[in-house]
Image: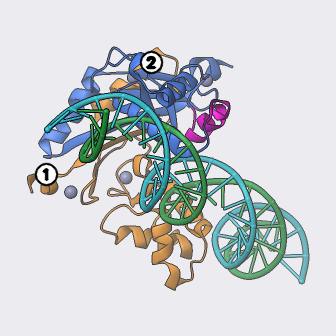
Chain colours: A orange, B blue, C cyan, D green
DNA sequence: ATAAGAATGTTATGATATTACATCAATTGC
DNA sequence: GCAATTGATGTAATATCATAACATTCTTAT
């Protein structure tokens, strides 16, 4: 994995915005937060996000069209990741499950399906929000 | 499950379009295909899709912003469904896995997370497309 | 120094989804 | 019957998310 030191200025700014955010951010929200840093157009954000995703430093949450900084940047190398997304407060938990990965892999093998990217996203209410 | 007979005209038209499609369709593609049936605005499509999803007759594929007719309208009642989506030909396979459901449920329980909707989508190449 | 490749800036456009408001139709309570 | 409620529909406008196209600047290898 590449360290943030190797990031370009724009990539570092976007990663920083995501890292300090309270939850997932949309590309346009990131853009707004980086106006003062010289950001002017969506493409600046999307380009940085693309690279950050390649580096495994950022994940895209498909079900809510938003992006989040990786919680374990050094841990997972290409393995399957699942997300639990609180629809109330935006908190995101990132986890892996060997068994889930194994079962989905088994299905794919049995059906001659060659996976390129797998998405697992659980939306709901986190501990804090569901107890309140 | 509600039979198509109980659907409104617009809902029936949208379901019919999806049922006869070669693969998942975007809302705007559906709109275009229903122009001759009097459809004029996106909302007509989105409203029908919303109801059809509630009835379990249609699924939304989050990772590709598209909709597909349920392959087993009588089978699954609120249980977890996984999708395998071919990025080449658009073919969608719909399946369930008890073990995956059990593992994700276990994680949720352990973390006091109350799930409302779970998405599992595997994108890749189907048997036909990966053998070619 | 120069050439090649990567990153950036800028504008415009495309694609997806919802808000707001008016109208129409079926149903219900009286 | 008839008003009141409810659900469905029509239409326009707008919001949100993402990419295309092209020019320019920066980095790096030779
Ligand atoms: Zn991660
Ligand atoms: Zn929460
Ligand atoms: Zn289904
Ligand atoms: Zn295929």
Q: Which of the pair A95/B78 is nearer the observer?
A: B78
Q: Give the percent coordinates (x, y) of residue A127.
A: 14, 52
Q: Tell me which chain the residue with mark 1 is part of.
A: A
Instruction: Report the side of A105 relative to B19 (left or right).
Output: left
Q: Is residue B75 magenta?
A: no
Disc 1 beta carbon < 8 A from ligand 2? yes
Q: Which mark is residue B71?
A: 2
Residue in the picture at 46% in, 70% down: A30
Q: Which residues are magenta?
A: B25-38
Query: Secondary structure under badge 1?
Result: helix
Residue in the picture at 34% in, 72% down: A20
Question: If the picture is divided into quarters, which one holds ligand 4?
Answer: top right
Compared with B115, A32 (above or below) is below
Circle 1 is placed at which residue position?
A130
Disc 2 beta carbon < 8 A from ligand 3? yes
Q: Tell me which chain the residue with mark 2 is part of.
A: B
Q: Give the percent coordinates (x, y) of residue B6.
A: 38, 20
Q: Which of the pair A82/D30 is nearer the observer?
A: A82
Instruction: Report the side of A70 relative to A111 (left or right).
Output: left
Q: Label 1: how many residues lie within 10 Å, few (<14), some (14-19) or many (20+)?
A: few
Q: Label 2: how many residues lie within 10 Å, few (<14), some (14-19) or many (20+)?
A: some
Q: Which of the pair C13/A46 is nearer the observer?
A: C13
């Amino acid at each position: 994995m590449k360290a943030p030191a190797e990031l370009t200025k724009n990539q570092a700014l976007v990663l920083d915005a995501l890292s300090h955010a309270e939850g997932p951010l949309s590309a346009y929200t990131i853009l707004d937060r980086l106006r003062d840093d010289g950001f002017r157009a969506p493409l600046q954000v999307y380009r940085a996000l693309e690279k950050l995703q390649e580096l495994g430093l950022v994940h895209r949450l498909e079900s809510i069209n938003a992006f989040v900084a990786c919680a374990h940047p050094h841990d997972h190398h290409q393995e399957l990741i699942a997300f639990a997304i609180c629809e109330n407060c935006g908190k995101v938990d990132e986890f892996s499950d060997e068994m889930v990965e194994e079962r989905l892999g088994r299905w794919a093998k049995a059906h001659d399906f060659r996976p390129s990217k797998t998405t697992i996203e659980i939306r709901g209410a986190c501990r804090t929000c569901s107890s309140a």
